[in-house]
Amino acid sequence: MAAIVDASTFPLLPISPPIATLSGLAVTERDVFVCSWPKSGTTWMQAIVAHLVAPDRSAWSHVSEVTPFYDAAASWDGAAPAAHLRAAFAARGRRAWNTHVPWSLMPKGARYVYVVRDPADAVVSFWHHLRNQRGAAGTYEGTLAEFAAEISDGTQPYGAWSAHVSDWAAAARDPSVLIVRYADMKRDAAAVVRRVAAHLGVENVDADAIARLTSFEAMRADAARYAPVSVDWAPGFEFIRAGRVGDGAALDIDARRALVAGLTESGREMVFGGDGEPSHVGIDVNGF
């Protein structure tokens, strides 16, 4: 079977180091990666993991001090994590990152939490994100419809949603990988906190308190703690923007179908099957 993701052509952000750097880090089972296709609940899960591995909030003023962006060149000194991150990790006794790198290109041997969201919702959120970026990270100038088509074609950063999810679905049965659906986070955040804590081996957790501290309302009220520092933003843009299920309805049905075209059977099961929320955008995923 041909590889789902090609390292030689995989599109990263303009602010990213080479994929070989991101793939080559030596890791241990105490290392934690919060993983996702962009805008799938990454910052939310990043905040949950930060509260689990660094529960004293007074010790960190920004979430990137605990779970920094793995994919930013600023997080690296050549092939090694940046000195300020090494110092923070050493003080805490555990390394944690957030990343959008697909499973096949990730360093192996750590613990991974992969968050997956309805594709149309994620694409709409990513479009808002990129069109409001400024500076070295670049600004997307096209329409939402154009952006969705480019995502389906795999030409935007991190490639096609279907390829990314299918790549991670191949690892869904790996005991080092925990799959979390965004819809489940919305339904019962405390239950998700307990699942993540168990996966990371963190004990004596007040899951209800962490769920309250990382709710949309709490994070939006404390946005300076969570908005990415790796990019600049358009004046007035709120990074913690909506946190809703259903914004993907802004895309027409053909665009939504194109996003899931090519999704493997295991990918469909991971996103839409089992006890997770069915797609809210009117797509019969079994019809493709």
Image: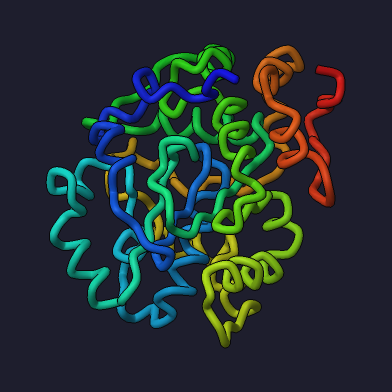
Q: Is residue 207 left or right of residue 67?
A: right
Q: Is residue 228 left or right of residue 17?
A: right
Judging depth in this view, the residue of 186 and 101 nearest the camera is 101
Is the C terminus in the top left, top right, bottom left or bottom right quadrant?
A: top right
Q: Is residue 238 above or below residue 126?
A: below
Q: Residue 13, located in which quarter of the rendered image?
A: top left
Residue plotted at (66% across, 46% down): 244
Q: Is residue 196 above or below residue 288?
A: below
Residue plotted at (44% across, 46% down): 239
**Horizontal and vertical percent position of residue 32:** 43, 61
Residue plotted at (66% across, 65% down): 192
**Which color scheme did the rendering employ for the protein?**
rainbow
Q: Is residue 181 left or right of residue 287?
A: left
Judging depth in this view, the residue of 57 and 234 nearest the camera is 57
| Residue that extends furthest to the bottom in the rendered view of this protein | 204
Q: Is residue 72 above or below residue 88?
A: above
Task: Tally the marks.
Answer: 0
Q: Is residue 277 left or right of residue 197?
A: right
Q: Residue 256, located in which quarter of the rendered image?
A: top right
Judging depth in this view, the residue of 251 and 17 nearest the camera is 17
Is the N terminus in the top left, top right, bottom left or bottom right quadrant?
A: top right
Q: Is residue 187 above or below residue 38?
A: below
Residue plotted at (49% across, 74% down): 52
**Horizontal and vertical percent position of residue 70:** 33, 48
| Residue that extends furthest to the front in the rendered view of this protein | 1
**Horizontal and vertical percent position of residue 242:** 59, 46
